Amino acid sequence: MSNGASPREHWSGSLGFILAAAGSAVGLGNIWKFPYITGENGGGAFVLIYLVCIAVIGIPVMLCEITLGRYTQRNPAGAFKMLNPPTSTLAHFLGMIMTLCGVFLMCFQYWGWGALLLVIGALIFRYRWMLVGAMGVLAGFTILAFYSVVAGWTLGYVVIAAAGSLRFTDVAAAATHFETFVLSPYWAVGSHAAFMLLCVLIVYKGIRSGIERWSKILMPVLFLLLVVLIIRGITLPGAVAGVRFYLSPDFSKISAESVLVALGHAFFSLSLGMGAMITYGSYVGREQNLFLSTLSVVALDTLVALMAGLAMFPAVFAMGFAPDVGPGLVFLVLPTVFNQIPLGAFWATLFFLLLSVAALTSGISLLEVVTAYFVDDRGWSRRKACVVFGLVIFLLGALCALSVGPSGWRNMPWLQRTFDFAFGGVKNSLFDVLDHVSSNWLLPLGGLFISIFVGWVWGPRRAVEEIRRGSHNFADVHLWSLLAGLKDDPSHSSDVHVITLASLWGIFIRFISPIAIVIAFLHTVGWLDLTG
Ligand code: PFF
């Protein structure tokens, strides 16, 4: 099923798909965020919990997304539109709850929130499950707007490091430099523009000669850079303490909070919950093995995250810095560390190049989600869609870039007043608002509805049928079949009561993943306190 006009372009084979999807998954989340949240949450113990979250939620939900994509051969909005049931009790129930909450909030004069819920309620009644896909396209838009700002900083740091100007004797000096850098409209907007331009150029070229070709070049480069940096880090005198800190588990630092951080990060890191994997899955040929591809993408993403920590902590310890400094680890501590080792400017340039490459392959997947929607469902040409939306996202991102800093909205008091009027008490910058809305709301809700949709609406039976094309050994045998929704599946008629991968997967996407996501979501938005 293609959009009618021309046959849909496909990846040239499994390797192209795996590298492109791993390129989407491996990004700032792996190299910038994973090491510092590991540093804050007990090192090796946190890594173990993260691995469990990846296995329990990451793999099942990614398989849902890729399967939906390949079956429908559409972008997320198109995929849900195609499979949207004519009526859905669950959707109507949700629509009713939203509408009632909206009316209730209006009564208490929460105008912005009330109106928002009323609109969402009406949209659910009108579009039902299609809204999940539309939410994915919207998330692609908002995530890329702030993601490209941080990616721009890393590009800017490549230039500054190569010029030999990242020379700081202490972290305070690095912090002053970083602040001047992000507050400079020229650097902040200019580097963001450069990053968006690269994304547009690659997406413009299409699937094989754009995204696949560049993923095949950039992913090995990224791997190589990482290996070189790890060797440099662990051969510094005193590096062993860093390896020990990173990999030896300290269970006393683990709390319910750490588990939720691990779960939330698993989603972001694997690019789940917004249909990036539905979109990439839609370019997969019928003969490819979806199950093995999913496992490979997840394994690569996890491997790079683990390696990123090994590239950083040994160097940080060897130079006597504290590991648990949070988000500043990459922009403040590492430049200071590099300044103290021989050929520091060279290593710093390599490091920020690594970060930029990782961000680029993720950025293109975000732009591709938006582009694919306008190509599939609105009949636009790929070139027009990616240029127009590259530009729109650039403009929104430029506002984000200018909103960063202590006086947040200083450049846009009008926008702050509008937000304040509608939603009350908005103190954070536009950057923080977009980050918060997409990471804490759109992605988890998207992931929740995707697994509920596949588990309860479209049904694991049809999904497993799709997965079986190209991977015959994925399914077959029963016992848990009833629970997993695979009761009438012809291959589940055996009398041998053992668990199959298919039935396990069905159980995970129907029960375990949704429940875990709901708990994490309620905690993140502050409606459930598990920290005790
Ligand atoms: N997975 C990317 C990272 O870890 O940086 C971020 C991301 C990319 C999230 C693409 C969502 C997405 F669709």
Image (cartoon, rainbow, N blue to C red):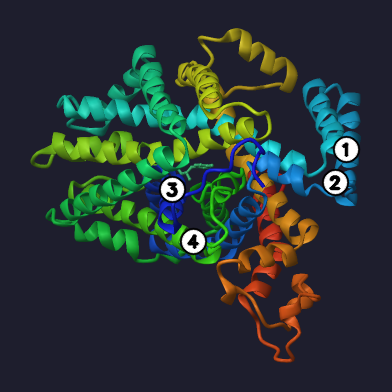
State the mark number for residue 91. Answer: 2
Q: Find disc 3 in the rendering and name its residue.
A: 20
Dot placed on the residue nearer the N-terminal end, 2 or 4:
2
Q: Find disc 1 in the rendering and name its residue.
A: 125
Q: Position of residue 216 (x, y in %)?
A: 34, 48
Q: Is residue 27 above or below residue 60?
A: above
Q: Position of residue 508 (x, y in %)?
A: 67, 66
Q: Kindly check if marks 1 and 3 are in contact, taking CB atoms under 8 A apart as contact.
A: no
Which residue corresponds to the image point at 26% horizontal and 56% vertical from the top-left?
242
Q: Kindly check if marks 2 and 1 are in contact, taking CB atoms under 8 A apart as contact.
A: yes
Which residue corresponds to the image point at 39% horizontal and 63% vertical from the top-left?
44
Q: Is residue 259 above or below residue 168?
A: below
Q: Is residue 214 above or below residue 471?
A: above
Q: Kindly check if marks 3 and 2 are in contact, taking CB atoms under 8 A apart as contact.
A: no
Viewed as shown, does residue 143 lie left or right of 252? right
Instruction: Name the front one of labels 1 and 3.
Output: 3
Residue closer to the observer: 205 or 400: 205
Residue type at numbered disc 4:
Ser
Give the distance between the C-alpha atoms of the residues marked 4 and 1, in whole angstroms.
Answer: 36 Å
| Mark 3 neighbour class, 10 Å CA radius: few under 14, some 14 to 19, many 20 or more | many
Viewed as shown, does residue 200 lie left or right of 178? right
Dot placed on the residue nearer the N-terminal end, 3 or 2:
3
Give the distance between the C-alpha atoms of the residues marked 2 and 4, in whole angstroms.
Answer: 32 Å
Viewed as shown, does residue 114 lie left or right of 70? right
Dot placed on the residue nearer the N-terminal end, 1 or 3:
3
